[in-house]
Image (spheres, coloured by chain):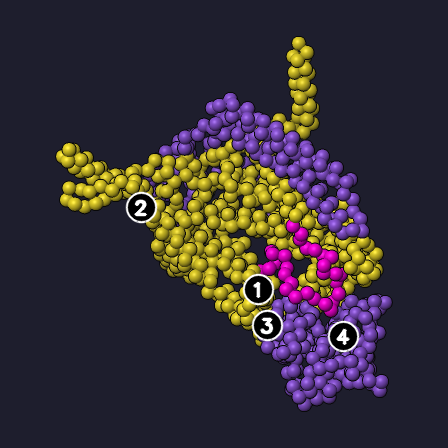
Chain colours: A purple, B yellow
Amino acid sequence: MTENSKEVELNKSGSTPEHEYDGGLRVANLDAVADPGLEPHRVRMTDKSVKHEKAAVRQVALLFTLSMLGSAFALWAYFTFPLSEDLSSVRLNTIYLGVGMTLGLLGIGIGAVHWAKTLMPDNEVSEERHLTRGTDEKRAAAIEILAAANQESGFTRRKLIRRTLYGSLALFPLPGIILFADLGPNPGDSLRHTFWKKGTRLAKDPTGIEIKASDVTVGSVFQVIPAGLNPENKEYLEEKAKAAVLLVRVDPSELNETEERKGWSYQGIVAYSKICTHVGCPVALYEQHTHHLLCPCHQSTFDLVNGCKVVFGPAARPLPQLPITVDSEGYLIAQSDFLEPVGPSFWDRSVKK
Amino acid sequence: MSNAQNTTKKNSFLAGTANYVDERVGASGILKEFGRKIFPDHWSFMLGEVAMYSFFVLLLSGTFLTFFYDPSMAMVRYDGVYAPLKDALMSKAYETSLNITFEVRGGLLMRQVHHWSALLFVAAAGLHMLRVFFTGAFRKPRELNWVVGFVLFVLGMAAGFTGYSLPDDLLSGNGLRIIDGMIKGVPFIGTGISSLLFGGEFPGHVVIGRLYALHIMLIPALILVFLAIHLFMLIIHKHTHYSGPGKSDTNIVGYPLMPVYVAKAGGFFFIVFGVIMVISTFFTINPIWNYGGYDPSPVSAGTQPDWYIGWLDGALRLAPTGLEFMVGEYTVSMNILLPLVISLVFLALVAIYPFIENWVTGDKKEHHALDRPRNAPTRTAIGAAGVTFYAVLWAGASTDLIATHFKMSLNQVLLAMQISLILLPIAAFYVTKRVCLSLQRKDKEIAIHGRESGRIVRLPHGEYIEVHEPLDPHDLYKLVDYKDYKPTVARPNAQGKITVAARMRASLSKFYFQDRITPATKTEIAEAAHHAHEIEAQVQKAIESGK
């Protein structure tokens, strides 16, 4: 570490420093250019000329006066521009109040800085620094105190006390931490079920109007929730956050369905979970031309006619498909709940329970 | 006569008050200690001040907002003055946020003051960190204060995010949903943590209230505590100053606290507040009434988080497709974990950088005179690489907007970002380092040979030269006053073994200092001056003989 010769830095006063530190890889420059000292002070106009000084005084006073006027203006504006049903009143209230308060603040600020820069002394002062560490005497005194405290308490000597104290200090926060367990229930299998059941009709979001297969023309998209899910439900948003579905009708010849999902669509009408398998944003954008569904949050893109498999973006899994069919009255219904958890991946989503 | 009486009266009143205060709180001792403390002056030292003042503005405007806001997720039918949302179902939190906007005089203004100052707070803190980094202000004895400042920056982001969610509008609700999705992606504990945070399933009925408690109590209290520690250490260390004539590691040059600094810094608070006020008066931020209340089904295209969360959102977006895999029947969401880990490692590197550099240089001396960034080329290059990495992640949060705005393919924009994330920081490192070294060479050249005078002279033998003029000693000193380190080799320890750490330190020291430019020395300058004199003599002779 001491491969380089130590650089002895002298304090301004010329005394040797209180403590010599190792400079490590620092190269002592014995041939360094000498420090010429502080640059000469430049005299300001306000120091040289009474006229300028007086002008500066007036400017500062003017700025402070402007501040007073601004604050008074803001008070006036508060009463003069009340809010009403007419939304332009919000704009007027904000602007007039804001302009007044801005003047009130900037007047003080600029005035004070101007005062400091033009009228207060601008001679730079140099002061000596001291090392952050205490002087050797101070350190010796501190060590003495610690030693005395140790001696008087027997902290090092009485091992039994010390160790049991460590143990108790380690344990005492635990009950405090466990208290937080009741912040939320054990998730259980809640993430695996949604509001959809066998026979639940598909309804429009947010009106709740049930959808007939004949209402769905080729190329149209419906934002869907399960019929019967309405704001009166206690867990309305929680259920909706899992049950939201996107319904699209495509030309049946364009659908590439796997053997096991052959019966999950109805005459080209397919229903997929709207909750992105990445981090759960609603996959709300449908590109009719390519049959791609796009999540606006992180641009994961799903291919609707190929089982909604991921074609782009950070998502890893296809959107879960809701098996649908029609009932005797021609309404679209779910054949069952989703057969896998919807939404973002979680650790044990594939564990059979 | 009456004038004189007034003066005496006034004086005795002041003296009386001063005496009263001193006898009760010992104010004279405090004033003697701190009243004339020296503070160096430089525009870049104001960045931290901007952050601190924005925080004060946040406390003021935030307190106002708490009086009107209700963090309840109970559903209500909107019955306020904003007609487009008439009868819409929304949470009480969103309703009261709308009421602050439309039914409280100055409410919208205060909401915007609060939001703008939050954006400014994190921005100023970030710039302040960059200033500290690029000037080497984090070196001994200030390493721990760097860590405290780092914690403040992270707390600032946390304060921002928790506050962002409170209006419970569609935009922030989707932000929360993203957080929920990320938490769920954490192995073993993800679903449990999510349930604890949301009090059950997302979105639940409690999360806004909990974020509110964090936002108005815990996080600001922590920020205040860390701010106090930050300033306390500032007083212990005294402020740094830039290197230059008359300024060294053993002195401090600046203006006394009273009156100059009190006026400047105090005035500056009002300027910062005033600027925030004027921005908030004329520029809308977070128009929650356009988004509607939170509903898990709709979403708006082109969503963007507040700027300081952008880099994390970008990290999520840049994850390539198909990173998720299974271990047995368990799902490992690397598409979420990888961005998380990368962000955390990046933050950790920022936090420990002072210790890394100090380990390499082994310099245990105290540093109070700041480096010009060019005089620490490798550090500056590392900083530039870090800034570039952050910037690419940040731009990554806008891939969709870049694509739609410039009519490019989203896929290719993303691919370009992914490549940039790896290549651009490396490029930034090399370019910055070369620029620094070149600037140092230029400085050295000027220090040794002086300034170009523009005087072209033809010597008797036909050669044309430009006469250089020597520098003013103050200007010269600015160019040569910097610390010089040289690389080390791995040396055996006391047992005669060359340890891995020693090897690593040796190669890191090479990485840092092998192409160093040493400061111009007295001898070099004297030699050059001697040479210049000879030429000048020749020139004079030529002129005389010409006559």
- Between disc 2 and disc 4, the foreground one is 4
In this picture, is B347 found above or below A113? below
Residue at the image position 74 percent from the left and 81 percent from the top: A217
Type of amino acid under label 2: Glu
Residue B293 part of the magenta segment: yes
Q: CA distance from mark 1 to mark 3?
A: 19 Å
**Image quarter hosting the C terminus of chain B:** top left
Query: Callout 3: 10 Å neighbours few (<14), some, many (20+)?
Result: many
Q: CA distance from mark 3 to mark 4?
A: 24 Å
Q: Which residue is mark 1?
A: B405
Q: CA distance from mark 1 to mark 2?
A: 47 Å
Tell me which corner region of the image, top left, top right, bottom left or bottom right, holds residue A270.
Answer: bottom right
Residue A294 part of the magenta segment: no
Residues tagged 3 and 4 counted as in contact (Cβ below 8 A): no
Query: Callout 4: 10 Å neighbours few (<14), some, many (20+)?
Result: many
Circle 1: element type: helix
Residue at the image position 39 percent from the left and 45 percent from the top: B483
* Residue B69 point in image, percent of width and height: 77, 51
Disc with the residue nearer the chain's start (3 vs 4): 4
Q: CA distance from mark 2 to mark 4?
A: 73 Å
Type of amino acid under label 3: Gly
Which residues are the magenta region?
Answer: B283-311
Q: Which residue is mark 2?
A: B445
Which sits in the foreground, A275 or A104?
A: A104
Disc with the residue nearer the chain's start (1 vs 2): 1
Q: Which residue is mark 3?
A: A313
- Between disc 1 and disc 2, the foreground one is 1
User: Badge 4 sits on which subunit?
Assistant: A
Disc marking residue A224: 4
Type of amino acid under label 1: His
The answer to whether marks 3 and 4 sit on the same chain is: yes
Tell me which corner region of the image, top left, top right, bottom left or bottom right, holds residue B175.
Answer: bottom right
